[in-house]
């Protein structure tokens, strides 16, 4: 009996395993640190209580007790998920304690070390650590999950399941995980499995051809988007930067915070999105970092890969990756804060209107047609420095407050991984009215991470000042006149092609 197709890694899932195999410095796990306030009349839960609680929920997450059939990709077949006969929760739910005084510096230093270590591919690809000793009686749960297992948005569903009673998600999880759950202990690999996997690759290619024949307009749109992507992001390569040097395996970690209502208000004033405002603040930080390094910010801008969720609402708790990307030019050479954010708003608007995300999705679809033995080279090209300088990802979290063990969840400090020769990556997580930016960086090449963090904070401060509701009339009038002059000047200029 052949293994169910739902147990096999997709080409995109396998990409994150391949990126680790190609470079010792790459670490392809996502995760974060969930910080809790102390519950009424108590402190952190015991490690036994955490393990018992997690064990009661794993029936809804069958992948979390499965390991890879092979530790490496390549050859004729993608690895599959199979039940780990030696699964032991004690290997996955651990305990740690911060040194005194247990403040943010100590927590970030601990997190940097924790996120520096790869997950063991001989076991299910996740970990959770109960972190005690935070100041003011707080405690934390740190999570680390391989990107081959879940993407950022999918991980939010898992976090909600782990923190809530699970009743609101159980019916969805049953549908998403039923096939995998039913196969536990009853499916075994057969000698003809590689042949079947090659046949599936052929079926995928044939299906793509049939789709092209039956849907010519869709095929034309995807072809145009893919062509535009190659012209814009492949032929016009991302600039050289000190952010793109060989990296090691150890990390630094820093946290920046912003008010979600304030960021939304700024976005509305600009006709842009929360993501546009965050990108503008990150642009300020990256510009300050380059200048501090005595490096001229490239006039064409640094290029950010901005992952986009394409997961349907019906795919709640469905693990694996459902993402595409926009490649956004960040105007780090622009000195004026208003012009900086305005350029980003206009640029992202053009990218979305041009179908750039469709082009990226098409590139991923085409990459998926490559057999496993050749796919590693494709994976390397998808995450090359020629395409982008830095990853900036925004994951919307729960809008309402959550709790665990009677303790309110205060904030989530997110993590996005570093691919080879990408020394910095920024993850943004929104939760209960707050934005938290987790900055992941290579330890050796980024000793000045604090400059980037302070620059991002400065970027948010500039935007708050620029769009403050209580700004005095002279200031507000200057902003209004400035906008009008720029709008008139733009109207006199011919339209420019989208960059990045």
Image: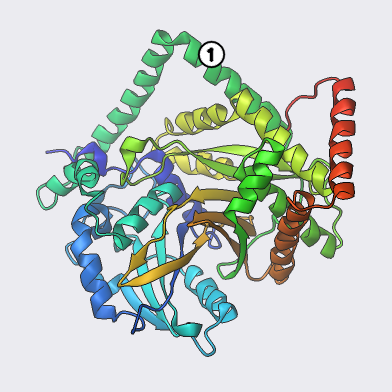
x, y percent for residue 164: 29, 59
Q: Is residue 69 above or below residue 386?
A: below
Q: Residue at x 21, y 49 (%)?
A: 170
Task: Say few, some or many: other residues with alpha carbon within 10 Å of mark 1 (under 14 / 14 to 19 / 20 or more).
Answer: few
Q: Is residue 470 visible?
A: yes
Foreground: 67 or 65?
65
Q: Is residue 242 visible?
A: no
- Give the left or right position of residue 142, taking residue 477 as reference: left
Looking at the rendered structure, the secondary structure element under dot 1 is helix
Foreground: 142 or 434?
434
x, y percent for residue 389: 68, 49
Q: Which residue is mark 1?
A: 220
Quadrant in the picture for residue 454: bottom right
> Looking at the figure, which quarter contains the N terminus?
top left
Q: Residue at x 89, y 37 (%)?
A: 481
Q: Is residue 145 above or below residue 324?
A: below
Quadrant in the picture for residue 93: bottom left
x, y percent for residue 172: 24, 43
x, y percent for residue 365: 45, 30
Q: Residue at x 88, y 26 (%)?
A: 488
């Amino acid at each position: 009996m052949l293994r169910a197709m739902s147990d096999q890694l997709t080409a995109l899932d396998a990409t994150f395993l391949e990126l680790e195999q190609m470079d010792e410095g790459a670490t392809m796990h996502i995760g974060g640190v969930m910080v809790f306030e102390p519950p009424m009349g108590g402190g952190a839960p015991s490690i036994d209580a955490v393990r018992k609680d997690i064990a009661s929920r794993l029936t809804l997450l069958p992948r979390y007790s499965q390991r890879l059939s092979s530790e490496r990709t390549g050859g004729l077949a993608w690895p599959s998920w199979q039940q780990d006969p030696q699964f032991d929760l004690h290997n996955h739910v651990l305990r740690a304690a911060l040194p005194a005084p247990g403040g943010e510096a100590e927590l970030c230093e601990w997190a940097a070390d924790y996120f520096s270590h790869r997950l063991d591919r001989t076991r299910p690809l996740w970990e959770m650590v109960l972190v005690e000793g935070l100041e003011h009686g707080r405690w934390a749960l740190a999570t680390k999950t391989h990107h081959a297992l879940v993407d950022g948005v999918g991980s939010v569903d898992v976090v909600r399941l782990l923190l809530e009673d699970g009743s609101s998600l159980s019916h969805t999880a049953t549908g998403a995980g039923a096939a995998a759950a039913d196969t536990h202990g009853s499916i075994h690999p057969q000698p003809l499995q590689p042949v079947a996997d090659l046949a599936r690759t052929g079926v995928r290619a044939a299906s793509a051809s049939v789709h092209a024949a039956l849907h010519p307009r869709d095929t034309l749109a995807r072809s145009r988007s893919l062509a535009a992507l190659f012209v814009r992001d492949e032929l016009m390569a991302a600039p050289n930067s000190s952010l793109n040097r060989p990296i090691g395996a150890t990390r630094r970690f820093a946290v920046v915070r912003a008010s979600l209502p304030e960021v939304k208000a700024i976005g509305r004033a600009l006709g842009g999105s929360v993501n546009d405002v965050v990108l503008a603040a990150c642009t300020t930080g990256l510009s300050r970092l380059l200048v501090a390094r005595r490096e001229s910010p490239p006039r064409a801008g640094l290029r950010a890969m901005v992952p986009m969720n394409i997961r349907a609402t019906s795919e709640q708790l469905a693990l694996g990756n459902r993402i595409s990307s926009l490649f956004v030019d960040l105007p780090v050479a622009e000195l004026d804060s208003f012009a900086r954010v305005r350029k980003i708003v206009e640029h992202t608007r053009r990218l979305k209107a041009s179908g750039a995300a469709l082009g990226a999705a098409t590139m991923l679809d085409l990459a998926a047609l490559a057999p496993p033995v050749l796919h590693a080279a494709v994976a390397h090209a998808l995450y090359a420095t020629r395409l982008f300088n830095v990853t900036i990802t925004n994951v919307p979290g729960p809008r309402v407050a959550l709790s665990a063990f009677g303790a309110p969840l205060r904030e989530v400090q997110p993590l996005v991984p570093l691919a080879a020769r990408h020394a910095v990556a920024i993850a943004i997580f929104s939760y209960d009215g707050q934005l938290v930016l987790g900055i992941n960086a290579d330890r050796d090449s980024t000793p000045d991470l604090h400059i980037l963090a302070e620059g991002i904070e400065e970027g948010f401060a500039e935007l708050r000042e620029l769009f403050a509701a209580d700004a005095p009339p002279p200031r507000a009038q200057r902003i209004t006149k400035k906008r009008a002059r720029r709008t008139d000047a733009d109207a006199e200029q011919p339209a420019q092609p989208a960059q990045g």
